[in-house]
Amino acid sequence: MRRAIRRSTTVLTIALLILALFPTYPMAEEGAQESQETSLDPYRSQFHYSPAENWMNDPNGMVYYDGEYHLFYQHNPTGNQWGPMYWGHAVSKDLINWEELPIALYPDEKGFIWSGSVVVDKQNTAGFQTGDEAPMVAVFTHEKAGHQTQSLAYSNDKGRTWTKYEGNPVMDMPDDTDVFRDPKVFWHEKTGQWKMVVSAGQSIEFYQSDNLKDWQHTDSFQRPADAEGVWECPDLVELLVDGDGNEKKWALIMSVSEGSSAGGSGMEYVVGDFNGESFSTEMNPVPLDYGADMYAGVTWNNLPKEQERTVLLGWMNNWQYGQDIPTENFRGAMSIPRELKLRTAEDGTYQLQQQPVAEFEQLRGETVERKDEVVKEGSQKLGDSVNDLLEITASFDIDQSSADSFGFTLTNESDQSTTIVYHTKEEKIALDRTSSGEDDFSADFAAVHEAPMKVEDGKVQMRILLDRSSVEVFGNEGTTVLTDQIFRDESSSTLEMFSTGGEVYLSELNVTDLNKANVEPMKRMIPEDVPNTLENGGFETGDLTGWTPSGSAFTHGVSQTETYWDGNPFEQEGNYHLWGFSEDVSDSDFRTGTLQSDLFQLSGKGQVDFLIGGGQDKERLYVALVRASDGKELFKATGANDEKYRRVSWDASAYLGETLYLKVVDYHNDGFGHINVDDFQVYTEGEPIGEELENGDFETGDLTGWTVVEGDAFSPADVTNDTDWGWGGPFNHQGDYHLWGAKDGGDEQTGILRSSSFVLSGTGTISYLIGGGNDPDRLYVALVRAADDEELMKATNTEWNDTEEYSKIVWDASEYVGEEVYLKVVDNSTEGWGHINVDDFQVKQTGPLAHWSFDEQEGKVTKEEVSGQSDPVHYVFNDAVYKASSDPLWRPGLVGNALLFDGYSTWVTREDDQFVQPEDALTIEGWVAPRAYEWGDLNQISAIVNKHDKSKGEGFLLGMGRHGKLSFQAGINGDWQEVSTTSDERLEKDQWSHVAATFDRNDQSMKLYLNGELVGQTETPNGKLTASSEDLLIGKHNQAALVNGVFDVNMFNGLMDEVKIANEAKTAKEIQQAYQSMVESFDDQTLPEPALDWDRTRYDGDQHRPQYHFMPPEHWMNEPHAPIYYNGKYHIFYQKNAQGPYWHHIHWGHAISEDLVHWEELSTALAPEAGSVAPDGVWSGSATLDENGEPVLFFTAGDDSKFPNQMTGLAVSEDPSDPELKEWRMLDEPVTVQEENLPAEEGEVMYGQFRDPFVWKVGDTWYQLMGSGIDQVGGTALLYSSKDLENWTYEKPFFTGDSEAYPKTGDVWELPVFLPLGKDESGEEKYAFFINPWFDGYSPHNVKYTFYWVGTWDKENLAFVPDHKEPKMFDYGEHFTGPSGMVDEDGTPILFSIAQDKRSEQEHYDAGWAHNAGLPVELSLRGNNDLGLQPIEELESLRGESLVSFENKGMKEANEMIQDVEGDMLEIILDVNPKEAEKVGLKVRQSENGEEETLVYYDATEETFNIDRNQSSLDPDVSKGVQGGELKLNGDRFQLHLYLDRSMVEAYANGQKSITSRVYPTSYDALGIELWSEGGDPEIVSMDVWEMNGAFGETAPVYEKETETVLPHGELENHDFQIGDLTGWNIVEGNAFSDEHVTTKDDWGWGGPFDQAEDHIDPERYHLWGFLDSSGGDAATGILESQAFELGGNGKIDFLIGGGNNIDQLSVSLIRTSDGKVLKQATGRNQETYRRVEWDASEYVGENLLIRITDKAEGGWGHINVDDVNVPVALSEEEKLLGQLKAMDLQTGEDLDEKIELYQDAEEKIEEKEETFVSIKNEMIDFLEKKLNLKKKEYTLSSIQLHFYVKHAIGETGAQQPSDAGKVQGYVMKRVNKHATGKEVRGVIKEYLK
């Protein structure tokens, strides 16, 4: 029963008292000032310690020493989130006000600096003391890559500097734990030893030591088994119990990483006994703080004994959201320091008490006090407003209260409220921050946190500390504590007291204003006398004299080393430099630290420059110029990921007279985590040179800023404001004053006047007014270079007309921009009109620098309007390889024409020296219409306009990032700055947009505009645009990423028009006006649609591009997929790269057809989009109809931010009524995401291999197959089921392969397809299951053949049951892959495929396209239950003229009938009875000379169907070989159905098997066909050949390029390494090249193939692979040279090259032997695969040269590969004769006479008769004998022929003397066939047998 409450006052009286006691009072003046100062950090704590900037977490190493409380803490100086850990440092005299000190401990090669403690080693047990005072010793955790060890550092100067112990670590990580951190060390008086508690995750480990170096384990304290997370940051403290000095207990304090009472991380403790070695307790851990934001609390060591207290400090944050709290410049704050006490609770347990330390009371201001009040039910406002910083203490008498709950609520004007409430029935206190302010950064933040708190002596006490962003509640003398952060805005607040469910009796209430604590920033003392130079700026002392290092990054860096890695020079200045990398330290890049120069006072010109090299990271690795007074970094520069030095120059003249210092910072721990510096120069003699001309208009009224060099022609008296000259006028000068040379003294005076010097800037245009006489030699104005006083430009008054009137002179001095110059006015004339007048010199002018209108309609250049010069437009077909050359893509624009950039080969170049570089201001603007977005390789944007080198912080770049984000980037003072749009504001595809970017030095800003609106801006450092020496490029990135060793990316794809650059910063109004004026120039104020259509006519005439196979209009495609028939249209989608002909950033292309043959391309169906389910790629999938019969698409959604990055996405048609289905929408979430550890019958499903959904429906259920694999088992397709297409259930692996038994089927299956084939003879439905293999790593089987099984679908068990275990290859060609399938409207299964072209990346680049689809194939079930296939009937619609049709012919007769049939677009149907022939087939694409041909044939002996491409092409880089497989005719005839489509060859045999292949003949006449057999003559039962029409309109004929005449020449010996060794090559030095390096390997073991040359001289395909383990691998070096040769022929050299990319150390070079000069050079591309290099060395024909192969590289990729070195070697006279003979054609007797005559001449000159010579003779004999078979009237035997033949007969018969004449006579007469008489023959024989 509660007592009745005495009502001693009335309600009115209470209300009046409230108003009196809590009046409206403003925030204290000091607080108001602070509010202004910290407006950028509205959540900055005012009396809790927080770092000045960046991240802070655990307090560390807290120790008291000599009057100072030291606070070290976990600190990331590089950012606002947890990362690389350092020890920050602050000190305090009173625990409330702090002074910041420099970082104490830096990461080093042993790891990051994690938590620990500091002790004062009073007895010097560790031996670190160096002076009279005891050292401080830090014991901390070193962490690196998860490995945690304990290490030491010590300080002998009160913690200002620290030295790490050389013997670190002193404790290694135990083997049985993955946590070993956060040591707390203290001195234990009783045992006289150091004790340590350290976390092992699930236990606290106890250690002891005598010297801090050697530790022994003594005990473990285990964590409860069911606890979440791990223990961290332990502490062990001894406390008095209830203040009684006779009883002490030990409190073991731990932090928990997760699972605390408030959620997430928190703290807990137990109380027990510690005997010096082990700890024991009967308690379970209880929370130390019930709030959410108290963690890692530990106590101060070494507190003075007289204080008799223990003080704890914690990190006021929570790991659930700590890295995301909404503070701006910093993140993290400490709790209020708390004194710990221990008391005995009513139940006899021990309980910690926490109270703010007594020093806190110094912050108290005014207090409003109340006592003995009754608070009625409801809420009562305690005044109109309260201070932001409060201490509230309250005591409530529960015995006199009836309320269910009561407490306080703080509410601001934004209705953000925080409530502290006590619940009387539950006896608990709660802190409610669900509405306290900003909380959207984490779902875990807004919460109510509760704690048990019993009523004690009838009382409930609260002490509440309220800071800007925190609330700490100490209940009942600190026995219950809650600490929470709150993020309320700065609007005025009110405090309310409330009571619910009754009244509460307030015994006492004090509301006290609190003042802010003081945190002093780091200070550097500035002496009175500071030098203006830098001591040891070049490190030439050989050490760090003049510099102060911290950390270990620079302690051993001063070096004399001149070269790095593979001998590359640093190019330092002088002997010494500071190399931030130490070769003597393992993992030197992990070291961190700072280096500060001595102070200097900036003077002279204010120029600061130095050399810099090393890593690139402007936030963590940089040099800064720092103002000493406030520590502000004025300028910054970083390295360029290159050890070599580059010079940085800063114009710091704005800081002249100020005291500064240089700071070198290394906070970088990753690769290239070091910085190199040298040659700091801070003083340059002279005055600062500006860009303006002082008093260039004479408006001072005198010659201020001008110097009279000599004479009296010019004086201040000549400066006048006269408007006329007395006898005429006016002057027409500018302003009030001008310089009239005749004003004071007339024409007889002479002299020279000079302006002040200035740096020419702006546009480089100089203008002024000139008057007076006309005398170019004696009266003129000159522009003079200051360095050498050379007159660069000069002018006189050429407009003189007997008048003083001014005329204007304009100079284009842009070539001198950046130089220091001055103006000189010369008067050396004493004659009439012997004076000169000048006014209004303008030397810094702004305006247009360049303007490209792109109005050309043709041509390969574009005019730049400002200069009038033309710039080249680079474009792949400017000099086409496979078609006729054609101009870049000029299209209609907004004004006239525009230029279409194709995405990979189009860009415009303005050379560096032709562009005036802006410095103070810049505007880039233009109209663009993107066609596609890039992926953003190297995290770079697609350049619109750029002239930059980001690594050097130079130049500018405007471009488009991923998903259309607009970005402007520039180097300001060498510091790279960026401003970008948000994801909501992007450049839209397929429409015109106006883009503009500005930089304004005066405004110190960069701004970005889109369609006239400001969409981004950023502040910039005070400085200029740093000039770049790169060329200005439009459409191409200066440092473009290279894909596949060939393709530059980061390129713009789309239209550009009206691109302009100016050296002025246009205003927002001007940019808006430019946009609006363009829009308004169109009648309906609507911009036209850009002409972005894809155009397949670009490729007209391409000899290899198919014409009736489906392929996109341009660029790349791979597998077609998701075929579907809907509303009378067939739809096919395909993998598409819109940027160029290479695999990358895949979209879904889309085309429609009514017959599966003639296709119409539509716009892209699906593209990677920001915020979508597929931001990184839309990969293969399938299509089906939903429950409404409407089409849906299933696709593989690529999202690299997730793992796995492959999921199933679903897209729906935006308008199903549209028969073309042009618009599609991806659902926001994936419908299938692979889960870990999916069940399978054997093995583990490979997590992350999950792609290519194939979906079909049975009944009311849809099924989905996803390609995947079972680890160590084989590929699989995972089966899912769904009732609604959006919610899918994993069932099981559908079918799994066996990669060990059938390695060609791969480790993972891609593109699973499951199609019905029909019923077998028993009526059972059969299905075909298709897959493509994928290999996890390199495999020799890595040809993506398509395999299939035929079997049944067990619906009940959801399993595919194959009829055969062994997989069958669907198509025997190398080029058929990527299957997809559908069942058409008639129920016919149709299979689609991709016919990959197997061309090199360079060939793709040159061609502009890659790959095409195979012909659609109709599937069926054959009688033997195997798969049947045939081309779809609709292909007949492509047939044109029938070229031949016959039946029942023999081979010879048939070939005669087709001998005139030619074509590269044919359909051929052949029916052959092989009869006795062992092989029978058809040759296609046969050249006239038969050197090139492709054979498709049936081998009856082996029962195989094959294609032989060994003679398909003379190109050695084209893949060749024989491919084929089993074909059983079972007595049937061989029936071949073959399609030729340029490079495509598709052959179908007997409805059973197919071969899809590609051929690339070099001869344009390779068009013939020929029937072929071997081992007998077959019967040609029938043959039909049709010309085929194109499927995309009229087919353009193949363009036949003029074939260059190849002059006779020789070859290098063993030029293709065909001998198998280095015969013909000379090893000059080293072991990088040997006979063993010559190999026939096709692959390198971990990848492949090499793609070495494949030609007739080297059937084994030898090549020189520069990597050989036994010779040292990449470390081997050497030089290999060919024999010297005289260059002949046309001088064109080509070869294959692979291996490393290092032109200085890895190269193939063409060397002139006379002087050793390198004439040509090439290197690899860090790829083993070969590419062909071609050199035009025609200018060196006739010179003696050699080929040199150099390997000087020893690191990774330190080798080079070479093959097929084709050099036209000049022929000897003998070789020329042989060549001439060989080339002579024999058609007539006259031809033979000429050849015999030349042959006889050669016979006399050539001593050693080679095989060639003999074959030439045999050719002539064969020709002659054939002619002699003719009748005499048909052929006349000439005398020279008879003599030639008699000589041949003498040789054949062995005749040597006259007696042998008969034998010869008989031989000749038998063969001359009456063409000569016996007498004639005897006469000739007699001549030779004398």
Image (spheres, rainbow, N blue to C red):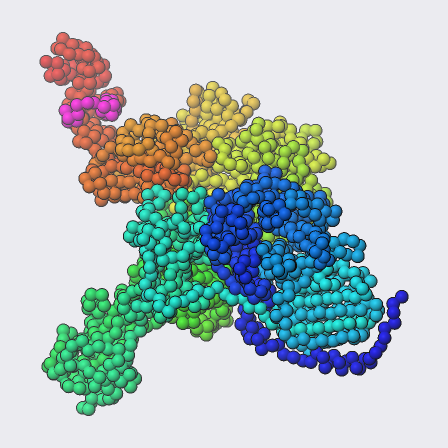
Question: Depth check: 849 or 652 in front?
Answer: 652
- 908 vs 1625, left or right, is right
Name the residue at 44% across, 20% down: 1576
Q: Position of residue 1355 (x, y in %)?
A: 71, 37
**Residue 1754 visible from this viewpoint:** yes
The quarter of the picture where the C terminus appears is top left
Q: Position of residue 1707 (x, y in %)?
A: 32, 40
- Name the quadrant containing residue 1808: top left
Quadrant in the rendering for residue 8: bottom right
Q: Considering the image in quadrants, where does the N terminus appear?
A: bottom right
Residue 1207 is a magenta residue = no
Name the dominant secondary structure of the magenta segment: helix
- Observer able to see residue 84: no
Residue depicted at x 46% and y 35%: 1647
Towards the viewer: 1127 or 1238 = 1238
Give the camera-side residue of 237 and 843. Answer: 237
Residue in the foreground of this view, choosing between 1813 and 1250: 1250
Q: Give the total of numbered labels.
A: 0
Q: Farthest residue toward the right?
A: 1
What's the residue at 38%, 49% (across, down)? 557
Residue 1688 vertical position relative to residue 641 in the rendered view, above or below: above
Residue beneath the point at 59% across and 70% down: 516
Q: Residue 1429 location in percent, x, y? A: 57, 34
**Residue 1804 is a magenta residue:** yes
State the residue lying farthest toward the top: 1859
Horizontal arrangement in the rendering, residue 1724 relative to residue 1748 (left or right):
right
Counting from the top left corner in percent of width and height, residue 1150 is at 54, 50
Per the rendered image, the range of residues in magenta is: 1801-1821
